[in-house]
Image: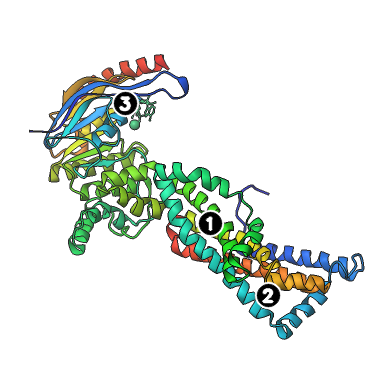
Amino acid sequence: MQPLEPIPRRARIALGILFFVLFVGAWAIATLGGFVSPTFLADPVTMVKDGVYLLTEQGFLADIGVTVWRVVGGFVMAAAVAVPLGIAMGAYKPVEALLEPFVSFARYLPASAFVPLLILWAGIGELQKLLVIFIGSVFQIVLMVAVAVAATRRDLVEAAYTLGADDAGVVRRVLIPANAPDIAEILRLVLGWAWTYVIVAELIGASSGIGYMIINSQALMATGQIIFGIIVIGLIGLVSDFAFKWLNRRLFAWRLA
Amino acid sequence: MNELEISEVSRVFPGAGGRPPVVALQPTTLKVARNDFVTILGPSGCGKSTLLRIVAGLDKPTTGAVIAGGREVTGPGVDRGMVFQSYTLFPWLTVRENIAFGLREKRLGEKEKWEIVDDFVEKVGLRGFEAHWPKQLSGGMQQRTAIARALANDPRVLLLDEPFGALDNQTRALMQELLLGIWEREQKTVLFVTHDIEEAVFMASRVVTMTARPGRIKSVTPVDLPHPRHYTVKASPEFSALRLKLTEEIRSEALAAAAEG
Ligand SMILES: Nc1ncnc2c1ncn2[C@@H]1O[C@H](COP(=O)(O)OP(=O)(O)OP(=O)(O)O)[C@@H](O)[C@H]1O
Ligand SMILES: [Mg+2]
């Protein structure tokens, strides 16, 4: 195989699907072949049956909706705070000097460890769930955006100055558009992480959501339901990832041109 | 009146990590009259870019000062347009939007702005490429856009730092004629850095040569070839004589630079 040589689109899609098939195949052999006890791991058929049961009888769609809304809500809050802050940090060195050490420290605070504390502060309502995701995402976004903005090509900034841009103009007309694709990419990445925080938030003190269903199913030893829940999360992640990529390609066509 | 007065400008870069400071430019004095076309010729590393950046206001001189249009330069300004050695078009803007960048800062009316832009698109021969992004252009087209972008702002002084340095010989020759043609028609004060002797002579009213690093001005040679200049002038005996003179001057500097490593 030749390194970095692209392959045809159809081959790429076929190979991508192939691995999913292999994965499910291995799973089916392990479970249906009797190599693994159903107590620990449900087989694919049971999983699908459990899934249908969840969707039709247990109102699982509502749980999915609640979880999606929590992720999106917490994430949008985080992005709304973090993106402007990250741009300010990347653009202005005093702001960076002020915030960078703290943000670097806060970034390592595990969002999941905040769950008990947040329950004390905000109860077990929606706000607490949103805050877990907010805390988990906000510092990551700030830092990554700041790094991207700080690495803007200096010659472009200088060109803008010689063309008469003032300091605010350089931020608005160079730093932001130059880094918009990177910022979108950062958001895509962190949104993926936000999904792990939401499940953690829902495992404790929740009465709805995918995480809540999973922890409930554990009590019932319903591994099929647990796996179905996990797969649903994976699928939603996959879809949102595709949507993000598609949008980025649309918005930032100049990069690919 | 002199459009540009560079007086005793020098630049020393502080040595990083315990190394000794680097003298990039020795005190340099140069007066440029209005509508003069001065080319600056010198071996690599002699401080040509440093000098141009100081004139543009992108770097501060260690000693001395630059007076542009009667006022001391303290930072970049629209009165001094710059075309860089590297490609510096804004990749997220189309050719047309790139050329309009400075005009938008000037808060011109939309109609007037696009008229000026289209005029310069025409002048640099980019008709049909207005809606292209920089990535879709060849190097020569990118530099033509960069020249149009600088000129559209109508600066008093145009600074060009080896704008054609990365281009092949044919394209380069065409670009020289294009730029010279624009200068002949519009009249503009130009400071043009190059290390190509033929280019320096062909474009200039005066050629300034610089010594090897650390650079200072070695000589100033007037070029009295008539305008409008056609590329055939390069075959004339006057041109050859000038080229030979400058080649000898630069050669000794290049040897000095090579000996120094
Ligand atoms: N920011 C900087 N810090 C330290 N040294 C620098 C800096 N910029 C330039 N120099 C040094 O100053 C000297 C002159 O650099 P300059 O870029 O002006 O040369 P130049 O004549 O434009 O060369 P070229 O023809 O290769 O573009 C070089 O020795 C370079 O190493
Ligand atoms: Mg240079």
Q: Quadrant of ligand 2?
A: top left
What amino acid type should be assigned to the residue bearing mark 3? Gly
Label number found at residue A138: 1
Residue behind mark 2? A207
Under tag 3, what secondary structure?
Answer: loop
- Judged by depth in the image, the label closer to the viewer, 2 or 1, is 2
- Direction right: furthest residue: A34
Tag 2 and tag 1, C-beta contact below 8 Å: no
Relative to the observer, which residue lies in front, A234 or A77?
Answer: A77
- For the point 31% across and 58% down, the residue is B130
> Ligand 1 within 8 A of label 2's CB?
no
Q: Residue furthest front?
A: A120
Amino acid beneath label 2: Ser
Other-residue count near label 3 (Cα within 10 Å), few / some / many at <14 / 14–19 / ≥20: many
Please rate how many residues cluster around mark 1, counting C-alpha atoms within 10 Å: few if below 14, some from 14 to 19, many from 20. many
Ligand 1 lies under 8 Å from the Cβ of mark 3: yes
What residue lies at 55% left-to-right and 65% top-to-bottom? A74
Crowd rating for badge 2 (residues with CA inside 10 Å; few <14, some 14–19, many 20+):
some
Which residue occupies the foreground of this view, B17 or B196? B17
